[in-house]
Amino acid sequence: MRLGNWDFKRMIISWKQGVGGFFLLLTVGCSGPQIPEAGSPAAERFLANCTVCHSWPHPKRHSAREWDHYLKLMDKNMQERGMELSAEDRRVIREYLHRNSR
């Protein structure tokens, strides 16, 4: 069976979402930096979407204003890779980052 480029990306995203949940549990149990609001729908959305291309950045890494800048950059990067964040995911992730920024 041959998969189209978008089908393959969806499979990877789905796999990473499952793995993201595992790593969320692992992160909560480790002594390293803990993700804010661990287990919440917003934190899960953040992990599922923001670890597709890179490891998760701690929300305290940037101010709310800086996060807005980086979210625009990530939107551009995702579009260049043929990926898109839904408006609802973008809103939830932005609010999550703002609540937990430095």
Image (cartoon, helix red, strand yellow):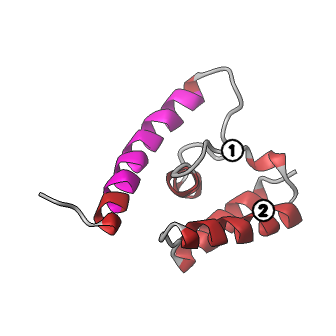
- Which residue is painted at 53% across and 45% down in the image? 39
Is residue 59 within the magenta segment? Answer: no
Kind of element beneath mark 2: helix
Which residue sits at x=51%, y=66%?
A: 81
Q: Which mark is residue 98?
A: 2
Report the residue marked by disc 1: 36
Reply above or below: 80 against 25: below
| Residue 98 pos. (x, y %) | 78, 62
Along the viewing direction, whichever of 24 and 84 lies nearer the viewer: 84
Image label count? 2
Residue at 37% in and 52% down = 12
Predominant SS along the magenta part: helix
Q: Earlier in the sequence, mark 1 or mark 2?
A: 1
Q: Which residues are magenta?
A: 10-28
- The Cα–Cα distance between marks 1 and 2, rounded to whole angstroms, is 12 Å
Say which amino acid is labelled 2.
Answer: His
